[in-house]
Image: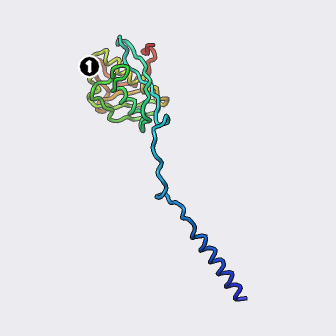
Amino acid sequence: MKMKRIAVFLLLLLSLSLTACGEKAPTLKEQPKPQVQETAEDKVKVTLYFGNEQADGLVSEVREIDKPGDMVVALISELTKPGKHAAVLPEGTELVYYQKEGDTIILNFNKAFANLQGSTGEFIAINAVVNTITELPEFNKVMLQVDRQPLSTGHAIYDKPLTRDESMIKK
């Protein structure tokens, strides 16, 4: 009887050791890394607003950009680049930070943003920023700041949230 128990024990031990000798499963470190490929999913279409040729309104421009980590930063960056239309923000403009408060976004720019080209340039740039940012569904109002203070251009002080102005958009 004792011999049968020893034989069963040895058989179990033998079968366990044989199953452990199989091919080793890959660990996280050994798994091949997926190759990054540019696909249509890596791009996103955005609607931006720029001044029209008569400088009396805005025209929309759809651009395909790399899918950004931060859409607000990407949209402001695109407004500094010429495309079909001239860049709408002054050279050197940078978004220092932004803050969300409900459906309002506070955009804080560096001093270059305040160097808008006269009252017409100011009118176009501010409406372009507001209409571009309010393309994002989470925002209905935009506060503009320079160095943490309401934007003051010499023509106006923008100390209240601004809303989208569809009447500015020309076809």
Of the pair 114 and 152, the residue shown nearer to us:
114
- Tag 1: amino acid: Gly
Residue position marked by numbered label 1 in the rendering? 154
Callout 1: few (<14), some (14-19), or many (20+) C-alpha neighbours within 10 Å?
few
- Residue sitting nearer the eye, 112 or 85: 85
Q: Position of residue 68 (x, y in %)?
A: 42, 36
Question: Image quadrant of residue 88?
Answer: top left
- Element under disc 1: loop
Residue 163 visible in the picture: no
The outermost residue toward the right is 1
Residue 95 screen position, x and y as percent: 33, 32
The quarter in which the N terminus is drawn is bottom right
Is 34 left or right of 9, judged from the image as shown? left
- Please tell me which residue lies in front, 67 or 12: 12
Residue occupying image coordinates x 64% and y 74% = 15
* Residue found farthest to the bottom: 2
At a point 40% along the width and 21% down the height, the residue shown is 49
Classify 127 as above or below 73.
Answer: above
Q: Position of residue 63 (x, y in %)?
A: 43, 26
